[in-house]
Image (spheres, grey):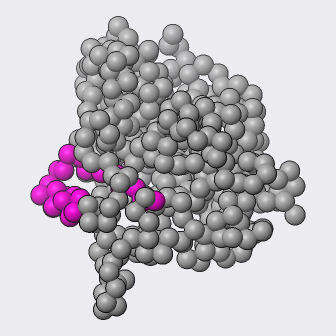
Amino acid sequence: MGMTMVEKILARASGQAAVKAGDVVEPKVDLAMSHENAALVLNQFHEIYKGTGLEAKVWDPSKIAIIFDHRVPAESSKTATNQKKVREFIAAQGITKFHDIRGDEGGICHQILPENGYVRPGYVVVGTDSHTTSHGALGAFAFGIGATEMASVWALGSVLNVEVPGTIRVIVSGKFPKHVLPKDLILYLIGKISAEGANFKVIEFHGEAIQKMDTSGRLTICNMSVEAGATSGIVPPDAETLRYLKEVAGVRETGAAFPLSGTSGPDPDAVYDQVIEIDAAALEPQIACPHTVDNVKPVSAVAGTPIQQIVIGSCTNGRLDDIEVAARILKGKKVARGVRMLVFPASGRIFREAMAKGYLTTLMEAGALVANSGCGPCLGVHQGALGDGEVALSTTNRNFKGRMGNPNSEVYLCSPAVAAASALTGVITDPRGER
């Protein structure tokens, strides 16, 4: 019996010839990531060694990445003190994959990992963040874990008692129409199968539309796989993966980029729990309406809804092509009065590239406010909380009640094209009328 992509990865990582859905394994970890919640992890990590007389040392400091991104710059003395505590731990442990609050190397964790070449096809990647699923875009099995579980990973280098998940195969054929983007695809899929439709499973993406999709788009669809309940999303590595690793991430040893033996993808006779087929050419822009991500409707169903704030950014849609889409729609025009448009590039590198290409100038001249890379507005801790009764349209990934800092507000989710077109009118707008 053949294996799916994730079954192959887990077989390699657990030292077995083959595994199948339902097996319980203890895979070795290739990369363990945390952000500011590393402060919680290190507390649990020290608890493991308390009373043992052993020195508390991580299993391999080169395989741990820590990125400050959720509250940057620190919005309170408590956050600043926790960040100081994590910096001291990083220095003591010799952890080198650390990205502090800096314009030259900082950014959102799920952008920093791929653009720095930290993630490779076939890796097992764990992170103390649910959107760790993003890194399946590079052919890795990437999933979120809790702080206590991460503490054991730091100590042992493996994840205990992992049940091999079943896999849903999603085949996306055809070509995306103009102003229909990967974000529309994943919103459509979530609406189709529901927020629990992929619980404890992996979504494995295939088809012509996926093959032609760049890594940025693949990061978007894998990022939001968790919103359908999935343990992870994954795209089998291909020529685009190698291109990204070489040209963007600067990886030189690409001959060893695929640690899997034989084919880099699933076996032809792999067994899937479900197969879903989608025609990209038939898609239109999608909107996730309050207050659940699976409350998805075509943009035509909610067009005209007034909005007060627009956010473009986050680990879902803060990459260079996302910012370019918005800049092209807004060039020479103005954001509607009464609308606040916030733009948060996903990393310092993307910020600088967007600045060099003139995208940020275009957006600012249109009336957008461009801020530093970070997660603040997405989870509502700072840099863009909503007022009572306000409505936001956002390219982020969640819209449950209170997500952007106020339970008395509403959040709609969309693509960068919809966000930019709506910024011009002050109401939710179909971007397909834009040039």
* Position of 128 relative to 353 (above/below): below
Kindly identify the residue that appears in the image at 41 percent across and 34 percent down: 318
The answer to which of 46 and 279 lies nearer the viewer is 46
Q: Is residue 317 left or right of residue 78?
A: right
Image height of 154 relative to 243, above or below = below
Quarter of the image with the N terminus is bottom right
Q: Position of residue 114 (x, y in %)?
A: 49, 43
Q: Does the magenta run of residues contain 80?
A: yes
Q: Is residue 140 visible?
A: yes
- At a point 50% along the width and 35% down the height, the residue shown is 250
State the residue in front, 389 or 60: 60
**317 is within the stretch colored magenta:** no
Q: Which residues are magenta?
A: 63-88
Q: Residue at x 17, y 50 (%)?
A: 75
**Could you say which quadrant of the image residue 271 lies in?**
bottom right
Single out the residue that lies furthest toward the bottom: 51
Which residue is at 68% across, 34% downward?
A: 239
Task: Where is residue 294? Give x, y as percent.
Answer: 55, 49
Residue nearest the viewer, comparing 294 with 312: 312
Would residue 309 be seen by someone viewing this image from the given angle? no
